[in-house]
Image (spheres, rainbow, N blue to C red):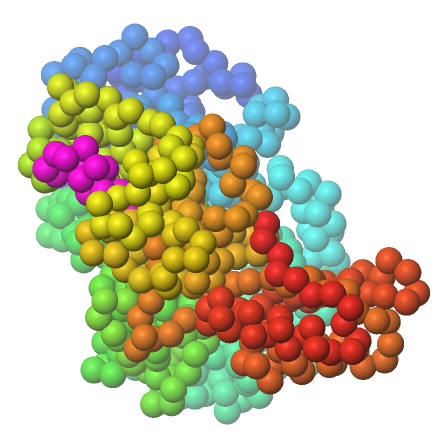
Amino acid sequence: MMRQYELVDRVRSYNPNTDEDLLNRAYVYAMRAHGTQKRASGDPFFAHPLEVAALLTDLKLDDATIVAAVLHDTVEDTAATLEEIESMFGPDIRRLVDGLTKIKKLDLVSKKAAQGENFRKLLLAIVDDVRVLLVKLADRLHNMRTLHFMAPEKRLRIAEETAEIYAPLAGRMGMQELREELEELAFRHIKPEAHATVTKRLEEVTEREGRVIGEIEKDLKDKLAASGIHAEVHGRRKRPYSIWKKMERKSVSFEQLSDIFGFRVIVEAPEDCYRVLGIVHMTWPMVPGRYKDYISTPKQNDYRSIHTTVVGPGHSRVELQIRTDTMDRIAEFGIAAHAHYKDGRTTELAQYADESRAYQWLRRTVDLLAEGDSPEEFLEHTKLELFHDQVFCFTPKGRLIALPRGATPIDFAYAIHTNVGNSAVGAKINGRIAPLLTELANGDEVEITRAEGQTPPAAWESLVVTGKARAAIRRATRTAVRRQYSGLGRQILERAFSRAERPFTDEKLKAALKRLARTAVDDVLAAVGRGEMYSGDVVKAVYPDLEPEKRGAPDPRSAGATTGNGKGWFELRKGDNLKFKLPGEAQLTEIPGDDAIPIRGLGGDLPVSFAPNGGAVPGDRIVGILTPGEGVTIYPIQSSALAAFDNEPERWLDVRWDLDDKAPQRFPARISLHSINEPGSLAQITTTIAEHDGNIDAVAMNRPNQDFTNVTIDLTVWDLKHLSAIISELREKRVISRVERVVG
């Protein structure tokens, strides 16, 4: 266990002006608080916070962070309180310890909803001060190093949490070394057999070809020195988890992997990186497609380096990373590299956090919390961005946009701005028109074509890869659907109030919100449109003194059943105010003063669908059935399916056709045929329909015997006259014995 003076010496080694008294007081306070507590390994519990503090001294962090590491378990596991810590160590350290205490209580591998909510709390705890995350990552690393002392069930849970959350989060913060060790330790416990197998194979390769590392190191140093470049060259074998991941990603065996060894070349200046690259490529052949320049285009976690793979001595593939000492420090320490100690003075990490692109990503991610997504959606979106590699694309004006690998122009549009994504209708990639679902490549220049007033298709949500795009598409879809239901609800209420002979205004509806248990007028409109609230209840809430409407079932041909306009409209039994034409009346046209809801088909502003077994076409007398959460389904008045709604009069709606002659639409219908079973009979049927401008959507056939075939055809037509003409023509065909329209 680290001694008190050793802790002080470790901090003083990089910060001569450290507050030794503060460190000493924290050491003594935590030691007394933990007392005789033991870890699962049997070691004193106090050894754990000291090891966490030691890890953070390697990152050269400030006094407050080191003290918070020493104290981070005291509030959770001892009698210590936050108030006591604040009085002894100040508000800054109290805030850090409080954040760490909250994180420790979170279960990040529980059921998805709880996991998502806890992940929200984790990010909220670290976004205000990233030092909380650094202490937590060091805490997790030491726990993973001693995980073998835990019970098997708990061991697996902690390892999965590490692999799913903490390792990728460390990577996003730029702490690559820490991420790799966390992944490796988690891999050992999640897939012990795979880890043992890959480790054994790596040891065999190292024993057989390990001398190659020394040869390449020597060759590189000699060649670079001969060119006047001072460089450090370090060779190493890749970790088992890295090998396993590549085998899974590329679906290859261990024998097919060639780049088992990697080398890091550290130089003094950025321009030296490119000089080294030239020497390397002139010495050994480069493997095409394996060159990446993260110096000119850094990753979002601030990582900068040049990567290349060459065919080295013995025809072995060798991966090289070329970077400066500063780049190497950022790659190793990530966001912690923004803590600086100059002239003996400490500058707080938090002060420099805004310089970090990684921290900016963290803030953008937390901004998604305000977008209203469910916890599980937020977790899904964030995990997508945690695990994906990146591609770098440009706007026509040269702005660099970093996206996850596999991103499309839709993701690109939303990365620029939510409004750009919502209005996107097309894209040009490198000056050429391309589909919006094209996968983007590094260096692509993308131009988005927009059309204001567009609503993104709901299908886009499953096609994009960025969390921001998915969240925005989901919100836009919800908004559009809500707008549809609100529009339908408003029309239903306007007609309900008109029948009650009472004025309808938003102000009157607003005054009744408490009685309706809603907070906004739009909530009421949408609830009525979705069928969750009956229009009569709204009328009663606005006008409590209104006499309830008397419902009857008048004889259709009685004088009392017709309206004052004398056009033959009457009240349908059980349908209350559903109006339709009597047989023999004039053609269906809009009646002045009619209060039925106009229907224009499937592409309008209302959530409308047609009866599933037969549909409806203009010319039919129609009825609307309101289904909660689905909108209005239109049935022909003669549909037998309407009997199922006889006892639910509140779901019946007045509807009428409202056709637009300038934009004609087709409508669904179904016909049933009994045809002779002979060659060419189906061809005659389909040809007849095509010649009469019918459009076939689906055909179903069954053969009751060897002589006849039953055929059911779903088609779309302009109106009832058009459908009747097709049926009439089919009846003239010799091969057809019977044809009729199907009305479900």
Q: Is residue 228 above or below residue 590?
A: below
Q: Is residue 225 above or below residue 183?
A: below
Q: Is residue 573 left or right of residue 493?
A: right
Q: Looking at the picture, how far across and down is residue 569, in whole percent?
A: 33, 47
Q: Quadrant of residue 414?
A: bottom left
Q: Residue at x 43, y 62 (%)?
A: 619
Q: Is residue 294 above or below residue 47?
A: below
Residue span colored magenta? 486-504
Q: Residue at x 22, y 29 (%)?
A: 538
Q: Quadrant of residue 435?
A: bottom left
Residue 330 visible (yes or no): no
Q: How many numbered marks have been drawn onto this rendered protein structure? A: 0
Q: Residue at x 86, y 71 (%)?
A: 677
Please tell me which residue lies in front, 454 or 76.
Answer: 454
Q: Is residue 132 left or right of residue 283?
A: left
Reply yes or no: does residue 529 show up in magenta. no
Q: Looking at the picture, how far across and down is residue 657, in whole percent?
A: 35, 59
Reply yes or no: does residue 502 show up in magenta. yes
Please tell me which residue lies in front, 558 or 662.
Answer: 558
Q: Main secondary structure of the magenta part?
A: helix
Q: Residue at x 52, y 63 (%)?
A: 668
Please tell me which residue lies in front, 289 or 33.
Answer: 289
Q: Looking at the picture, how far across and down is residue 181, in whole percent?
A: 50, 47
Q: Looking at the picture, how far across and down is residue 706, in whole percent?
A: 92, 65
Residue 428 visible (yes or no): yes
Q: Quadrant of residue 541?
A: top left
Quadrant where the N terminus sits is top left
The residue most toward the right is 706
